[in-house]
Image (cartoon, grey):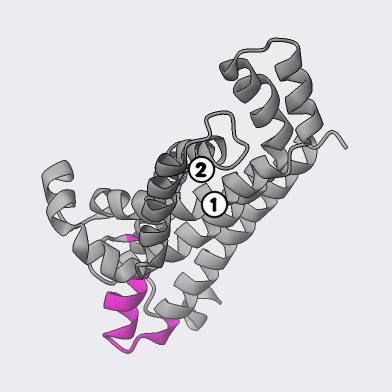
Amino acid sequence: MFEQLFPNVNMEDIITATNETMYMTLISVAGTFILGLLLGLLLYLSGPGGLWENKPLNWFTASLVNVFRAIPFIILILLLFPFTDFLMNTIRGPKAALPALIIGGAPFYARLVEIALKEVDKGVVEAAKSMGAKYSTIIFKVLLPESMPALISGITVTAIALIGYTAVAGVIGAGGLGDFAYFYGFQRNDFDIVVICTILIVLIVFIFQFIGDFTSRKLDKR
């Protein structure tokens, strides 16, 4: 039945492409979470009323985030070729896609982090400050735990965007399902390959969405 529906699909190749997509997604999500969290904290803490209120720092961080959010991902990959080649010693393959994926995803997630932190009850923060809590204590014991459900929801949304980015990166030889669908499906007019790659990408999105929603609900104490 499978061979009749997808006569041009080689299972070994499709498994390799799926593994490459999962590799790019998992590593880039981890990198995006760390970098995006740092940027989001900086945006929140240096903003008006923040613990480290600093207009120049906030302006610089916000400008950096906005600039990288505004650059289309396919163009960002091209712009980062010299940096990627220097860092990874190659501009092809799944590993070479990671810098662009992380740099492209982190600013998007940073804004979600900032929004999540702004939703934390200011009364809780003020109570911690009045008790003499250090800034580090407020950040790691109040802000992050209180905003964790929203942070998980935000990284879930970002992860799904990154899955789409991996498909775009595949068009310029990064590997994965996007690469397989374009070079082995579209360019050879083997539409069944495009279909199976699409189905697998949708399944990966559903898996990440399910894990993210489940984790967010578990962390939500309301």
What residue do we see at 53% from left, 54% from top?
158
State the residue at coordinates (58%, 19%): 135
Q: Is residue 53 left or right of residue 66?
A: right
Identify the residue position indicated by label 1 in the image.
111
Residue 117 spot, x, y in % from top left: 65, 40
Residue pointed to by mark 2: 43
Disc 1 is placed on an element classified as: helix
Q: Residue furthest top?
A: 132
As for residue 189 lying within the magenta part, the answer is yes
Most common secondary structure along the magenta stretch? helix
Amino acid type shown at disc 1: Arg
Q: Is residue 219 above or below residue 65?
A: above
Q: Quadrant of residue 222?
A: top right
Q: Residues within 10 Å of mark 1 (few under 14, many from 20)?
A: many
Q: Between 94 and 48, which is closer to the camera in this rendering?
A: 48
Amino acid type shown at disc 2 = Leu
Q: Residue 120: percent from the left, percent from the top?
A: 74, 38
Looking at this view, name the residue that lies furthest to the right. 222
Query: Badge 2, how many Cα within 10 Å: few under 14, some, many 20+?
Result: many
State the mark number for residue 206.
none
Q: Which region is colored magenta? A: 176-192
Q: Is residue 83 visible?
A: yes
Percent x, y of residue 107: 44, 52
Q: Is residue 157 magenta?
A: no
Cα separation, mark 1 vs mark 2, equals 8 Å
Task: Tell me, yes or no, whether the two marked residues, 1 and 2, touch with CB atoms within 8 Å.
Answer: yes
**Quarter containing the N terminus:** bottom right
Residue 7 location, quadrant: bottom left
